[in-house]
Image (cartoon, helix red, strand yellow):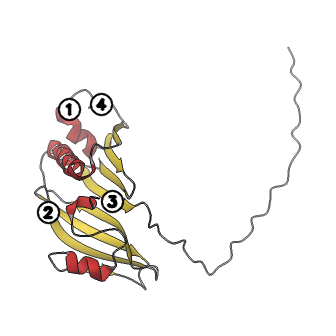
Amino acid sequence: PLTFERRSTDWGMNAQEVKINEPVQPTWELRSPILESSEQRVAYRTQIEGIDTSLTYTFYEDKLAQANYLFEPKHDDGADYVQDFHKVKTWITQSYGMPTLVQEIWLDSLYRYDQSLWGQAVMRGHLKMVAEWRNETTLITLLLDGGADTIGLMADFDSVAIVPPAPMQASVLEEIPAMEEMPVAENPITE
């Protein structure tokens, strides 16, 4: 089966195996005490479709469970970010086939009827663009989002089989007392 993003990594690999398969050294690593003891993250700088990208692998109990791509293009025109969304969508589609969902979520329809202004719509928080893929091993979400004149493009690749362990909590949850039931007075209807 094709692995996420055509890299030399597979779900379930340990951190050392991923580092051996990556062509460059990691830019940073995080583990306990910053993260839960069962979690570790390793990050790389890369380029996807000509776009500078941060790639972060997340491991649970030393098994690769997630890969997150944070795309970092520098554009003056918001429409270029919309084009980047479509380039990355095509790139993922080459490995995973057609998305199971593609959606434009309009929070304000001001720019909806002029596609040349969709970049402005994203920058102002009026539009979110989403594409999703799912197969027997991987769930992928591609998201273009913005607001306050900023835009973010990211792709999350998640293993279907390897999920984060339930957080261990030392404290016992306090029981919330039940509210007393108060009888509701019936108001007769008068005409």
Closest to the camera, between mark 3 and mark 4, is: 3
Residue 3 seen in this snapshot: yes
Figure quadrant of the N terminus: bottom left
- The residue at the far front in this view is 1
Pointers 3 and 1 in contact (C-beta within 8 Å) = no
Identify which residue is drawn at 32% across, 45% down: 130
* Image height of 42 relative to 68, above or below: below
In this figure, which residue is indicated by the disc labeled 3?
157
Q: Say what amino acid the circle numbered 4 marks.
A: Leu
Instruction: Give the x, y percent position of residue 90.
Output: 19, 46
In this figure, which residue is indicated by the disc labeled 4?
110
Q: Say what amino acid the circle numbered 2 marks.
A: Gln
Q: Which secondary structure lies at badge 2?
A: strand
In this figure, which residue is indicated by the disc labeled 2?
47
The tag on residue 189 is none
Instruction: Give the x, y percent position of residue 155.
Output: 29, 56
Closest to the camera, between mark 4 and mark 2, is: 2
Figure quadrant of the C terminus: top right
